[in-house]
Amino acid sequence: MAESQEPIESLVKKESEPQRDPIAGRSTSAILLICIVLLMLCTLWALYDEGFGQRPWRPMQQEFVRRYTAYLRSIRKNAGASEAEIKQTPEYQQLADDAQASLDKVKDQIADIDKHVGAIQAQLDAVTDPFQNQRGRLVVLTFKLETARPGGVWAKLYDSQRKAKLNEQVSFEMPDDNGKPTRQKMKFDELEQTFNRLRDEKAKYQGQKAELLKEPSELAKTRDEYLKNHVAVLPQKNIDDLIRKNQNSFDYTILGHQISVNEYGVVDRCEICHLGAREPLTIRASDVAPNGPGKRPDDLARAFVSHPRKELLQIHNPDKFGCSACHGGNGRATTSAVKAHGENPFWLHPLFHKENTEAGCQMCHANDRVTQGADTLNLGKDLFYQRGCVGCHRMEAFDREADALSNSRQQISQLQDQIAANERQAKLDTDNSANANDDTEVQRLLAHADSLRVQNSQLAARIDELNLQTRYLQQDQKKVGQTSKTFV
């Protein structure tokens, strides 16, 4: 009995003892330490991401300042120098000597090619007129033959004349290889073969000449560009001011290079990376190369160059239009070039490729037949017209007559409806005036009817004017198609 009671007493004793508190019963310093370490790591990562991760332009701007300052110092000694002074510098003399040496190396070959081309040109001049005259006569006879009734008298006559013209011996003087004129007689086929052979030979020699002059031309271009970029670039004081600005007061913030056009809600930060776009000096990629001016450029150097068409910035001020309005891309993005250029799959307006830059001009100048500074776009519009595409495909810039004609007809219809409504109201006012008891009401109704008739006369004059305009528009309306003449 005593043994059976002992476990019950021990159980009651255990239940009466206070339960152990897991928080008060052991230390939480390890958990707190881990949490503090994680919190500090998160804070450090957030600070790093805010200061560097989300601001990749900072090292780019520092690199631009370093390279641009080195370029400014390299041209400082020649600031404001005249053309004669630049030509006396060792750098220009070396470039000039290299260009002249390259030209002297191929001078004899160029002279020999020019001699052959001159002889071929003399023969080509002699055969061109007889060939073109004979070809013109054959084209006329062929046209008459094709338009004549098959099997008829005129068709047989034109066919015999055409065959006779093909077999006719054309006499002309043509210089031989020594330049001495000799009398030649050729049929049309022989004239055509001779003309094509001489033209092909001339093109072959000219291609050889262009290949020989390729290296001398490039060296001469390098020499001329050096002279252009070093003659009176900027006064020395202005260059010193630019150097001081880069070293002491260059703005490394977003707002310092951000373009905000509040009128259109445009925010562009393109110049945070493209820092040389509006610099007073013309900056080329070789000027801000990583190993110094004149060395091989890298991708950063190509991003630091000046705007290629500075004259366009005079009429399209970036502070008024922004950058992305013309070039596309995501002007707000700054974390990567892919996002900033809109090359990710979720951006609807990616940056235009270099070959397609003028597509941005079409956004605002679609109605302009000729757009200043957009030669490729103008050529495309010319081809659109010359090839007859406008005959089937609508384009706003080429459909002004059709659109104006449609608007004029719509206005005429509206004016005619207005005249009919005024006539009904005038008749109603006249009828009501006969039944009115008050003289004042009678005068008001008659006056209103008269005013409606006067208005109808004005509307009729406007309809006559629109009809005249419509007649002129019908005369000017394009009737273009893909005819054989279009492709000549």
Image (spheres, rainbow, N blue to C red):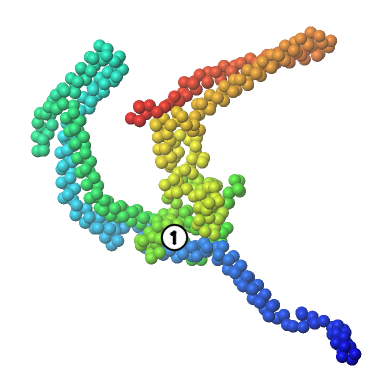
Tell me which amino acid carries mark 1: Leu
* Residue sitting farthest toward the front: 1
* Residue sitting farthest toward the top: 434
* Residue sitting farthest toward the right: 1
Q: Nearer the viewer, residue 256 or 129?
A: 129
Q: Position of residue 9 (x, y in %)?
A: 88, 87
Visible in this render: residue 310? no
List the residue tagged with mark 1.
300
With 385 as the anchor, is 87 left or right in this view? left
Q: Nearer the viewer, residue 151 or 198?
A: 151
Where, by quadrant of the figure, is residue 83 drawn?
Answer: bottom left
With 151 as the anchor, is 183 left or right in this view? left
In this rendering, is residue 166 above or below 206? above
Name the residue rendered at 46%, 62% in the picture. 64
Q: Position of residue 261 (x, y in %)?
A: 58, 49
Q: Nearer the viewer, residue 394 or 428?
A: 394
Visible in this render: residue 483? yes
Q: Where is residue 163 in the image (x, y as percent from the top left)?
A: 19, 20
Where, by quadrant of the figure, is residue 445 drawn?
Answer: top right
Name the residue rendered at 61%, 20% in the picture. 413
Where, by quadrant of the figure, is residue 282 drawn?
Answer: bottom left
With 470 as the anchor, is 486 left or right in this view? left
Q: Is mark 1 on a helix, strand or loop?
A: helix
Name the residue rendered at 49%, 62% in the picture. 61
